[in-house]
């Protein structure tokens, strides 16, 4: 039998998987630049640690839970065992245009970065060990099942007809509300909000935002799973919405504060990317610009809510990812057009309120589920292993306390390799002796 494999589509999906992978260190840089100098390494470690552990869980059972099971009888989750350790998925299917393992690799990156997004809400103060345990449990109980709801053909949100092309509900709303829950459990940073906690490295923030934008074309356009018209439309919508969001955020800053900042530009970029993620296949470029503007304005305003409601979301995961995800998901119900690849009309294109109702159900179902489970996981960990580093260690610096390292070694304190710290310790003991 002649193989149906499409080498162009396969190459695009594998390239997109690599693009999403580079978003993860991009996220680490974006977050890392925003924390204080004494916390930068811990922030990088939390994001990369999520990559390490979720990557293993995805292969062990995550893919099976998300995309296994009988489509006719699995509305909530797939199977822990059907594709455990990717059993049976390495054989070439002559009837498939895309190798299953290419899809496995692509979706693995989504799982890893979704968990990493949560870390920004608890920067500076959470035990690394507790974070890694939380990441593993939350991925298992929340992300894998929600991915099944949204993207598996048997998932109940998919069956309902909710449009979430690349992760407004499954990724951003899901991670954003989990970040809020974990921030509540862990508590406020020492000195917040009285003490100024400014970003220590804004060039690093901009580099991170640039890597995120670059990789996001794989995130969104790659979700077409083919090098086709849909991926091209999605690419353009992703680009133009992000431009609009960045401009809108900067305008809000200028009107409100008198200055347009580099941090605001980087944050606007991410807000636009978040909002266009669910909607990029459902709107035309004009709709994408409107969604970008809405995200830029609303997210710029939403990051101040933590001061009003007294929750310490360190790096504005709630204001950018939760709010941005809700904006992009709900506005599909207003600005979707049948001329776009998704082929659905929203309210403003004569489609009535039907799609808006579906989008609302999907968004708030994921929000409620993730919030409850994240709170439960957080409080259980708090009662058992503890989730917070000691206040003295937080003040002196989490990098030094947990990792025995510093982000920047200046002057004659730098140099050496992996064993430099061991050598320095031995030298000190020799001098004391």
Image (spheres, helix red, strand yellow):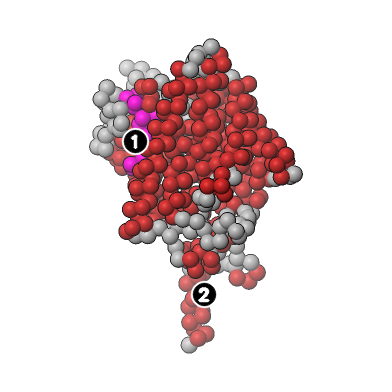
Residue contact between numbered discs 2 and 1, judged by CB atoms under 8 Å: no
Q: Measured from the top left, where is residue 65 in percent x and y?
A: 31, 35
User: Percent position (x, y) of residue 113?
Assistant: 46, 42
Q: Is residue 292 above or below residue 94?
A: below
Q: Secondary structure at mark 1?
A: helix
Query: Which mark lies nearer to you, 2 or 1?
Result: 1
What residue range appears in magenta? 140-156
Task: State the residue in front, 105 or 170.
Answer: 170
Q: Is residue 390 left or right of residue 247?
A: left
Vertical order, 166 against 270 (above or below): above
Q: Residue furthest right?
A: 258
* Relative height, residue 236 to residue 117 (above, below): above
User: Which residue is the site of mark 2?
Assistant: 424
Residue 29 in view: no
Q: How many marks?
A: 2
The residue drawn where x is 40% and y is 58% is: 387
Residue ranking furthest to the bottom: 433
Residue, x 51% and y 80% (percent of image)? 428
Would you identify the image quadrant in which residue 276 lies? top right
Count neighbours of disc 2 (C-alpha within 10 A) and say few if under 14, some if 14 to 19, many if 20 or more: few
Expressed as whole percent of the image width and height from the top left, the position of residue 81 reads 24, 37
For label 1, the residue is: 145
Relative side of 419 to 87, left or right: right
Residue 28 coordinates in the image, percent (x, y): 53, 49
Residue at image position (43%, 47%) is: 181
Q: Residue at x 66, y 37 (%)?
A: 249
Q: Main secondary structure of the magenta part?
A: helix
Image quadrant assignment for residue 289: top right
Dot 2: what SS?
helix
Instruction: Check residue 143 for magenta coloring.
Output: yes
Q: Earlier in the sequence, mark 2 or mark 1?
A: 1
């Amino acid at each position: 039998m002649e193989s149906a494999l499409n080498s162009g589509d396969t190459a695009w999906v594998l390239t997109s998987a690599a693009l999403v992978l580079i978003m993860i260190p991009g996220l680490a840089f974006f977050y890392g630049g925003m924390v204080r100098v004494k916390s930068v390494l811990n922030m990088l470690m939390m994001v990369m640690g999520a990559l390490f552990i979720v990557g293993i869980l995805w292969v062990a059972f995550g893919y099976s839970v998300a995309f296994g099971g009988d489509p006719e009888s699995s509305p909530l989750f797939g199977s822990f065992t059907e594709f455990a350790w990717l059993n049976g998925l390495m054989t070439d299917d002559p009837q498939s245009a895309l190798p299953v393992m290419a899809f496995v690799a692509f979706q693995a990156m989504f799982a890893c970065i979704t968990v990493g997004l949560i870390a920004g809400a608890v920067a500076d103060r959470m035990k690394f060990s507790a974070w890694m345990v939380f990441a593993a449990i939350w991925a298992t109980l929340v992300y894998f099942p929600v991915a099944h709801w949204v993207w598996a053909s048997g998932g109940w949100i998919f069956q309902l007809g909710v449009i979430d092309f690349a992760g407004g509900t499954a990724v951003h709303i899901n991670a954003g509300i989990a970040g809020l829950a974990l921030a509540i459990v862990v508590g406020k940073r020492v000195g917040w909000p009285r003490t100024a906690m400014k970003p220590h490295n804004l060039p690093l923030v901009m580099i991170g935002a640039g890597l995120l934008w670059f990789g996001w074309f794989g995130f969104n356009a790659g979700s077409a799973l083919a090098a086709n018209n849909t991926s091209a439309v999605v690419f353009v919508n992703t680009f133009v919405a992000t431009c609009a969001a960045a401009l809108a955020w900067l305008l809000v800053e200028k009107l409100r504060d008198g200055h347009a900042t580099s941090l605001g530009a980087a944050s606007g970029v991410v807000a636009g990317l978040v909002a266009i993620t669910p909607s990029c296949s459902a709107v035309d470029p004009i709709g994408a610009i409107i969604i970008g503007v809405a995200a830029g304005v609303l997210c710029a305003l939403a990051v101040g809510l933590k001061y009003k409601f007294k929750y310490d979301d360190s790096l504005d995961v709630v204001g950018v990812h939760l709010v941005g995800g809700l904006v992009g998901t709900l506005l599909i119900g207003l600005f979707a057009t049948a001329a776009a690849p998704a082929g659905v009309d929203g309210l403003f294109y004569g489609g009535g309120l039907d799609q808006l109702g579906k989008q609302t159900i999907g968004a708030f179902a994921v929000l409620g589920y993730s919030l409850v489970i994240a709170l439960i996981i957080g409080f259980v960990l708090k009662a058992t292993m503890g989730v917070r580093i000691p206040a003295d260690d937080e003040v002196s610096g989490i990098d030094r306390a947990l990792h025995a390292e510093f982000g920047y070694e200046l002057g004659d304190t730098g140099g050496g390799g992996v064993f430099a710290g061991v050598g320095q310790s031995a030298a000190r003991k020799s001098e004391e002796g």
